[in-house]
Image (cartoon, grey):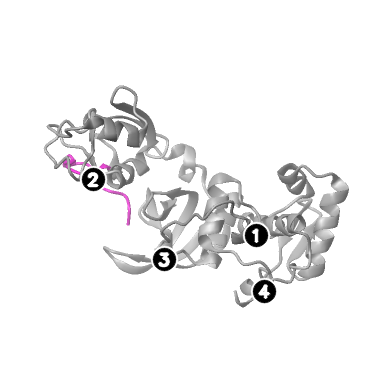
Amino acid sequence: MSHANIRPAEHLAYAQRERLAFIELRVYFCGNLTRAHIERRFGVKPAASARDLIAYRALAPHNLQYSAASRCYLPTKAFRPIFKHTAGHVLNWLRSGVGDGVEDISARAIPCESVHDLAEPKLDVLSTITRAITAGTVIEVSYLSLTSGASIKRLAPLALADTGFRWHLRAYDQAKNRFADFVLTRIESARSTQETIPEPQRLPHDAQWNRMVPLDLVTHPGINHPAAIEADYGMTDGNLALSIRAPLVGYALKRWSVDCTADHCLSPQSHHLWLRNAKVLDGVESAILAPGFTASPDTSAAKV
């Protein structure tokens, strides 16, 4: 990744640099690129997308190879990024589909800052994972677990999830025969096996991922002035209804400090919201993280 700080395209107009950065992002993290990707993303004509590809290949002649069989551009084994990409930028692009280009702080309309993550996943690990998700192939990773330490795992990578605290990989653990969450920053290395993910290990068969949990959030009954909390969360009549995927529910309730006890007995000073329908958490593996929730004996977390 020593080339990451090089900015060889600075002599180009910003709009074209953004398109070239998109070309690199798409190839680097999705593993393929067609001219149609550029044309759809930026609304340009085929002639313009062809010029952008020529321009990128002039700047990075060893990064792309054309596959006649797939009719698309693929990353070469010698691929090295020429733009500076941070994991946070890439994950935001993957999550929202915007912000494709180079980061330009000077382009901000007003001063705007945020708290940075303490750690970010390695870009080479992230690109291996995202390419495998796109291709539907199995990966082998070196993983650091809180419970079992370092180990080599064979995973069927399925999706990325932002818990609000950090990023997870949703995957099928082939050794333990289960779907589970893996913290991206705990993956030290990853390599593609080029093996196709078996159908039973794909996302449509992940019962937890496909379960949407309806949450009925209300202001904590112990709050003296609930109007302030209602304004914080845009509530209607003191109520906020939303639906979240089961693997993310526990993280969301923890992040929002929601009192998930049946009798709203947690402190309203630190828990401004109460989950009025806590029974919906039954059978949700991530609910063990929800403040005040007591998991049933047969419920276990699937994050390692």
Q: Earlier in the sequence, mark 3 or mark 4?
A: 4
Residue 119 disc label: 3
Residue 102 disc label: 1
Helix, strand or loop status at disc 1: loop
Helix, strand or loop status at disc 2: helix
Helix, strand or loop status at disc 3: loop
Residue 13 disc label: none
Q: Residues within 10 Å of mark 3 (few under 14, many from 20)?
A: few
Residue 288 disc label: 2
Residue 47 horizontal/vertical position (percent): 88, 49
| Distance between mark 2 and mark 3 Cα atoms | 24 Å
Residue 72 horizontal/vertical position (percent): 76, 53
The magenta segment is: 287-304
Can you tell which quarter of the image residue 151 is in? bottom left
Tags 2 and 1 touching, CB below 8 Å:
no
Q: Amino acid at mark 1?
A: Val
Label 2 or label 3, whichever lies nearer to me, is: 3
Residue under the point 85% across and 50% down: 48
Tags 2 and 4 touching, CB below 8 Å:
no
Label 2 or label 4, whichever lies nearer to me, is: 4
- In this figure, which residue is indicated by the disc labeled 4? 6
Residue 219 lies, with reference to residue 42, above or below; the image says above
Q: Amino acid at mark 4?
A: Ile
Helix, strand or loop status at disc 4: loop
Tags 3 and 4 touching, CB below 8 Å:
no
Along the line of sight, which residue is nearer the eye, 27 or 257? 257
| Distance between mark 2 and mark 1 Cα atoms | 40 Å
